[in-house]
Image (cartoon, helix red, strand yellow):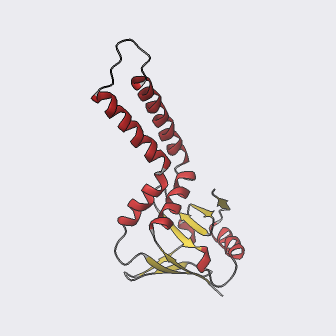
């Protein structure tokens, strides 16, 4: 019996997808970005702290503090922000998908159409909580809601997809 998922893309599911991308195929880039942001925050803190003679709390200080707050906010809510932006860029009619996984390939259907996928196109497979995420490259992924899985257990699907793709399932926290 084939495995079937019915996944509804929401900002939350897109945030899960963004987090998995960040922690897997974008790991090095994400680390560099965070290091750069930390350096900018340290420099900003040195600029706004009253440690030198002639310090003035002025408009420039307020702008620096605001920029630091924005950087901290983006760092804290990066996945939610990227997920929301990905959700807003989705083509109308592609939010609700039904995917069927058979021995040869898998098929995804939605209001827009039906797409057939080969397992060899999947670069990496990850799991975060109830979600399975297929990573195709650093900008493209698909998420499947494990709570809607029919045709077997989540563990059976994990074994099946690992065998078909040749990639072990990576758990993302």
User: For the point 53% across and 66% down, which residue is it?
Assistant: 121
User: For the point 65% across and 59% down, which residue is it?
Assistant: 170
Relative height, residue 130 to residue 27 (above, below)? below
Relative height, residue 166 to residue 57 (above, below)? below
Rendered-image quadrant of the N terminus: bottom right
- Which of the 4 image quadrants contains residue 169? bottom right
Q: Image check: 5 left or right of 167?
A: left
Position in image of residue 72 (x %, y %): 45, 42
Q: Image check: 157 left or right of 77?
A: right
Position in image of residue 158 (x %, y %): 68, 71
Camera-side residue of 38 and 4:
38
Position in image of residue 82 (x %, y %): 43, 56
Q: Image check: 43 left or right of 16?
A: left
Camera-side residue of 118 and 132:
132
Q: In the image as oriented, which residue stretches furthest toward the left?
A: 59
User: For the point 29% across and 26% down, which residue is it?
Assistant: 58
């Amino acid at each position: 019996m084939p495995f079937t998922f019915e996944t509804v893309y929401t900002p939350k599911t897109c945030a899960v997808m963004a987090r998995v991308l960040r922690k897997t195929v974008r790991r090095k880039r994400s680390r560099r970005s965070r290091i750069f942001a930390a350096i900018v925050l340290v420099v900003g803190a040195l600029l706004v702290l009253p440690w030198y003679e002639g310090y003035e709390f002025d408009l420039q200080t307020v702008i620096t503090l605001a920029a630091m707050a924005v950087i901290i906010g983006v760092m804290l809510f990066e996945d939610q922000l990227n997920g929301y932006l990905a959700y807003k860029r989705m083509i109308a009619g592609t939010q609700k998908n039904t995917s069927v996984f058979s021995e040869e390939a898998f098929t995804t259907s939605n209001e827009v159409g039906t797409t057939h996928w080969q397992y060899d196109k999947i670069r990496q497979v990850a799991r975060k909580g109830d979600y399975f995420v297929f990573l195709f490259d650093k900008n493209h992924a698909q998420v499947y809601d494990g709570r809607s899985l029919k045709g077997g257990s989540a563990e059976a699907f994990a074994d099946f997809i690992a065998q078909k793709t040749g990639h072990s399932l990576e758990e993302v926290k």
